[in-house]
Image: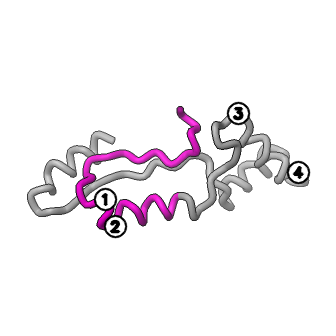
C-alpha cells in the first residue's frame, strides 16, 4: 500500500492515477486447487461453502467481482481517486 501511495504522489503531476485492488478469497482454479491439496478433492463445493462462512456477505468472490472493481477504478467515475487501496473481499476484513 505504501508503494501505491508513493507512486500516486510521484506520478500525479503527469495525471497518472495509481491504485491497488486487494481481493479476498475468490472462486478461482487456484483456490479450488488449494482445497484439493487440503484433502477436499471430492468435496470441493463444501470446501468453498465452508470458506465463505462467517463473512458478512456469506459468499466467496467471483473473478467478475474483482474485474468490476478494476473497471470502476479505470473509469471516469474514479477520476479523482489515486493512492487508494480498494479491498474487494465481501467484508472479510471488516
Q: Secondary structure at mark 4?
A: helix
How far is disc 4 from disc 1 in space, using C-alphas?
41 Å
The residue that appears at 56% across and 39% down in the rendered structure is 91
Tell me the element at label 2. loop
**How far, Cα to Cα, is label 2 from label 3?**
32 Å
Question: Of marks 1 and 3, which one's residue comes earlier in the chain?
Answer: 3
Residue wearing tag 2: 75
Residue 77 horizontal/vertical position (percent): 32, 62
Q: Which residue is mark 4?
A: 43
**Distance from the alpha carbon under mark 2 to that under mark 1:** 6 Å
Are the residues at dot 2 and dot 1 in contact (C-beta closer than 8 Å)? yes
Q: Residue at x 46, y 58 (%)?
A: 69
Q: Position of residue 92 (x, y in %)?
A: 58, 37
Q: Which of the two discs, 2 and 4, labels the residue nearer the N terminus?
A: 4
Q: Of the residues tagged 1 and 3, which is closer to the observer? A: 1
Left or right: 76, with 55 as reference point: left
Give the residue drawn at x 52%, y 58%: 66
Give how far across and how far down residue 85 sits, in percent. 37, 45
Residues shaded magenta: 66-94
Q: Secondary structure at mark 1?
A: helix
Amino acid at each position: 500500500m505504501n508503494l501505491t501511495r508513493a507512486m500516486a504522489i510521484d506520478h500525479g503531476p503527469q495525471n497518472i492515477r495509481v491504485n491497488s485492488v486487494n481481493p479476498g478469497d475468490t472462486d478461482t482454479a487456484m483456490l479450488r486447487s488449494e482445497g484439493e491439496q487440503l484433502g477436499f478433492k471430492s468435496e470441493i463445493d463444501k470446501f468453498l461453502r465452508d470458506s465463505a462462512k462467517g463473512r458478512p456477505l456469506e459468499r466467496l468472490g467471483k473473478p467478475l467481482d474483482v474485474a468490476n472493481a478494476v473497471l470502476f477504478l479505470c473509469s471516469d467515475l474514479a477520476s479523482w481517486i489515486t493512492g487508494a487501496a480498494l479491498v474487494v473481499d465481501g467484508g472479510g476484513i471488516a
